[in-house]
Image (tube, helix red, strand yellow):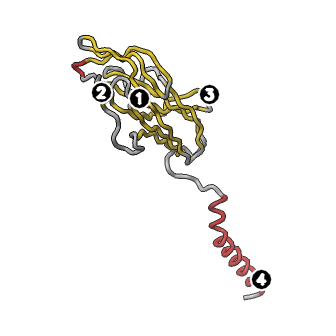
């Protein structure tokens, strides 16, 4: 080998060793393409901040507690909206097949911004303040969510079990269209009004 070949071999070896030594630092600085599909998580937890003991039976005037959470795995920062909705047994839930939200109007909303990999969670207190039983129907007239009062007429039929559902839809702000859109995620908790 001549001097020029030694020089080339030395340069290649030095460059190779430098890259190997710098790899841990490069991984922290240079973004590596993510191969997983972007997604968002939406969850509810029971009053003990666990996935158990969800409130089922609720008396008029009794306050119940849930925790609502969202995690961003969309590979970019996102602006989220969570709508809290209340329905009887016959009103529609969101349609997973067509990615459409429920037609039930939201009672309460949470708006927040999350960077990729960040989580958000908040408590949600709710109370059925006023309801009346007449004939075969229970009519819920006032609901409190986080100390805000909402009025309506939510009629549940006795023959269907006098049950209601509080549910939460996840929405995203679409930067391209400038509008919020349903993110095809919802979670719910059934409620039986006991009196």
Residue located at (50% from left, 50% from top): 36
In this view, the residue in front, 65 or 103, is 65
Which of pointers 2 and 4 indicates the residue nearer the eye?
2
Determine the CA span between mark 1 and mark 3: 21 Å
Residue 190 rendering spot, x and y as whole percentages? 33, 30
Residue 4 image label: 4
Sort mark 1 into few (<14), some (14-19) or many (20+) by Cα contacts within 10 Å.
few
In this view, the residue in front, 71 or 30, is 71
Where, quadrant-wise, is the C terminus in this rendering? top left
Q: Where does label 2 land, which residue?
A: 192
Sort mark 2 into few (<14), some (14-19) or many (20+) by Cα contacts within 10 Å.
some
Which of pointers 1 and 4 indicates the residue nearer the eye?
1
Determine the CA span between mark 3 and mark 2: 39 Å
Determine the CA span between mark 3 and mark 4: 61 Å
- What secondary structure is marked by label 2? strand
Q: Where does label 3 land, which residue?
A: 178
Residue 169 rendering spot, x and y as whole percentages? 45, 31
Q: Where does label 1 land, which residue?
A: 98
Residue 23 rendering spot, x and y as whole percentages? 63, 67
Where, quadrant-wise, is the N terminus in this rendering? bottom right
- What secondary structure is marked by label 3? loop
Q: Earlier in the sequence, mark 1 or mark 3?
A: 1
The reply to whether dot 1 and dot 4 touch (C-beta < 8 Å) is no
Q: Earlier in the sequence, mark 1 or mark 4?
A: 4
**Residue 184 position (above or below residue 50):** above
Q: Earlier in the sequence, mark 3 or mark 4?
A: 4
Residue located at (62% from left, 27% from top): 178
């Amino acid at each position: 080998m001549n001097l020029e070949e030694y020089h080339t071999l030395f340069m290649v070896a030095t460059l190779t060793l430098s890259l190997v030594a710098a790899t841990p630092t490069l991984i922290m600085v240079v973004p590596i393409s993510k191969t997983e599909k972007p997604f968002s998580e939406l969850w509810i937890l029971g009053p003990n901040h666990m996935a158990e003991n969800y409130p089922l039976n609720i008396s008029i005037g009794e306050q119940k507690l849930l925790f609502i959470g969202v995690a961003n795995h969309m590979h970019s920062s996102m602006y989220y909206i969570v709508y809290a909705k209340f329905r009887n047994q016959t009103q529609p839930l969101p349609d997973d097949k067509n990615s459409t939200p429920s037609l039930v109007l939201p009672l309460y909303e949470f708006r927040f911004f999350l960077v990729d990999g960040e989580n958000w969670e908040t408590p949600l207190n709710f109370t059925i303040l006023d309801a009346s039983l007449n004939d075969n129907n229970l009519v819920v007239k006032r609901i409190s969510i986080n100390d805000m009062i909402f009025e309506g007429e939510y009629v549940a039929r006795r023959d269907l079990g006098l049950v209601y559902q509080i549910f939460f839809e996840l929405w995203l702000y679409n930067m391209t269209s400038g509008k919020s859109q349903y993110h095809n995620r919802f979670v719910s908790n059934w409620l039986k009004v006991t009196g």
